[in-house]
Image (cartoon, rainbow, N blue to C red):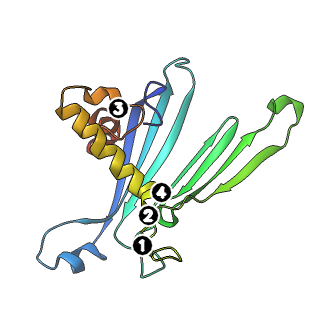
């Protein structure tokens, strides 16, 4: 959804690695890539002479570590950057506090939202309903009910939930790769 209505993907190049881990995991002769990397070039919808690029990587080959899979996103932009570490449920954000020509220093924040709390509070009560992981599922279920009841349409949630319309851009990139 980050590029929706802002830029369009104009070129995709994909690379893969294989015969390291996936074949051992499948152990049945099926071919499966270990790592897939896609490089996408984006063109600004408001300024077609302005382009950017993104690199997307997915892999089975991670060794045993503190998380099952490393899931990261990094975006470097003209006036800021976003660095998301989904595996550890946190992200950092740096933005220019003033116009870049004025020599302003960037402001930085390390934001670590609590995704899910699987243990009770000091009184033994369940408290995960206030964590964003729980709230995300709750919002999805409520949206599905409103759609099923005919009160809302799926596109009404494009700006707040990962609907099919929002994810089709990423799907197109993955299929092109």
Q: Residue at x 42, y 72 (%)?
A: 118
Visible residue check, residue 176: no
Kind of element beneath mark 4? helix
Image quadrant in which you'd find residue 153 = top left
- How far from the left and from the top, in percent, is residue 159? 42, 31
Q: CA distance from mark 2 to mark 4?
A: 5 Å
Mark 4 highlights which residue? 130
Precedes in sequence: disc 4 or disc 3:
4
Q: Is residue 75 left or right of residue 11?
A: right
Q: Are marks 1 and 2 in contact (CB under 8 Å)?
A: yes
Mark 2 vs mark 3, foreground winner is: 2
Where residue 160 sits: x, y (%)? 42, 36
Q: Which residue is mark 2?
A: 128
Q: Residue at x 26, y 43 (%)?
A: 175
> Could you give the CA–CA distance between mark 1 and mark 2, rounded to whole angstroms?
7 Å
The disc, 4 or 1, on the residue closer to the chain's N-terminal end is 1
Q: CA distance from mark 4 to mark 3?
A: 21 Å
User: Is there any visible trace of residue 169 in the rendered image?
Assistant: yes
Disc number placed over residue 133 in the picture, else none? none
Q: Residues within 10 Å of mark 2 (few under 14, many from 20)?
A: some
Residue 88 percent coordinates (x, y): 52, 66
Which residue is tagged 1? 118
Q: Gap in Å between the C-alphas at discs 2 and 3?
A: 24 Å
């Amino acid at each position: 959804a980050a590029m929706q209505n802002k830029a369009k993907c104009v070129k995709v190049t994909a690379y893969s690695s294989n015969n390291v881990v996936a074949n051992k995991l499948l152990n049945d002769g099926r071919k499966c890539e270990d790592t897939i990397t896609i490089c996408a070039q984006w063109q600004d919808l408001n300024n077609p002479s302005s382009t950017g690029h993104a690199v997307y990587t997915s892999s089975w080959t991670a060794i045993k570590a503190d998380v099952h899979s490393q899931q990261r996103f990094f975006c470097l932009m003209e006036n800021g950057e976003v660095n998301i570490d989904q595996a550890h449920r946190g992200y950092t954000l740096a933005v220019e506090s003033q116009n870049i020509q004025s020599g302003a220093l960037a402001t930085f924040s390390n934001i670590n939202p609590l995704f899910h709390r699987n243990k009770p509070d000091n009184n033994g009560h369940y408290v995960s309903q206030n964590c964003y992981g729980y709230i995300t599922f709750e919002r999805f279920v409520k949206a599905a009910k409103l759609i099923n009841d005919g009160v809302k349409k799926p596109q009404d949630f494009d700006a707040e939930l990962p609907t099919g319309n929002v994810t089709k851009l990423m799907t197109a990139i993955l299929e092109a790769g």
